[in-house]
Image (tube, helix red, strand yellow):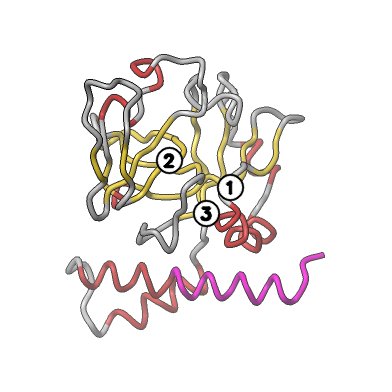
Amino acid sequence: MISLSTWCRYFGHKLEYSMAISWKHYKGGHITEKEVGDTVWKNLLQGKLTFLHWNKGEEMAPTIGSQGGTLLVRKIPIPDPRRVFIGDVVVLKDPDNPTNFLVRRLAALEGYEMVSKDEKEEPFVLDKDECWVLADNEALKPKEAKDSRIFGPVQMTDIIGRVIYCLRNAVDHGPVRNSPFGERKDYPVLEVELDVDEMAKNHKA
C-alpha cells in the first residue's frame, strides 16, 4: 500500500518533470509558447517518469550482471548538479556513437580537480557542465571498461537518466545503489512505477 505522502511526493516529481521537459522543448523550438501549458498537462496526466533499458557487458558488474539486466531508468530531462549526483548510476549517450547508450557511475562533476595515478599526466579541472564517469568493475583495464579514463570528460547533457532498479533474472533483482540524494529523490518514483512483472516480460536473457 503506497502512502499518501509518497503519492504527493510522486506527483510533485511529475509536475517538476512536466515543467522541465516542456520548457526544454520550448527553448529548443519544438513547441510554441501557447503549447507549453498543454504539454505540461499532457506529461503530468499521461507520461511516466521511467523507461526500461537493456544493458549487457562486464563493465558494471556486480551492479549489473555480465549476462545483462533489464533496467528501470528514471528520466532526467535537464541533467545538472541539482538533479544528478556523484555516486549515481546513469545512462548516457556513448561519446563514440551517440546512437548507443552506456551505463556508468558518476564519479565527478564540474569544478572537480582530476588527478591521474600517472605522474606524467597533469591534473585538470572539469569545466562547467562536464562530468566524469567510471565503470563499476574494477577488475577491468581502462580500455575494457570504456569510461572517462579512455574518452575523457562527458557533457552533462549526454545523461538521459538514472538507473533505479535492475532485474538480472526472475529471482535476482532489486534497487540499484545510488547516491543518498538520488535514492531519496527516486523513492516515490520507484514505489509507484516499479512493475517487476513488466520488466520480466521485457527481459532478453
The mark closer to the camera, 1 or 3, is 1
Determine the image quadrant of residue 121.
Answer: top left
The residue where tag 1 is placed is: 164
Q: Which of 177 and 190 is in front in this view?
A: 177
* Residue sitting at x 51%, y 53%: 74
- CA separation, marks 1 and 3? 9 Å
The quadrant of the image that shows the C terminus is: top right
The foreground one among 205 and 135 is 135
**Circle 3 residue:** 50
Query: Where does residue 124 sit, x and y in percent of width and height?
Result: 23, 39
Residue sitting nearer the eye, 50 or 176: 176
Q: Earlier in the sequence, mark 1 or mark 3?
A: 3
Principal secondary structure, stretch drawn in magenta: helix
Task: Give the residue pinned by disc 2.
Answer: 107
Task: Residue 2: say if magenta.
Answer: yes
Q: Do the residues labelled 1 and 3 touch (CB within 8 Å)?
A: yes
In this view, which residue lies farthest toward the left? Answer: 29
Residue 39 in the image: state x and y as whole percent: 36, 75
Placement of 122 over or under 30, stated as above or below: above
Assess whether mark 2 and mark 1 are in contact (beta carbons under 8 angstroms).
no
Residue 4 placement: quadrant:
bottom right
Q: Give the range drawn in magenta.
A: 1-17
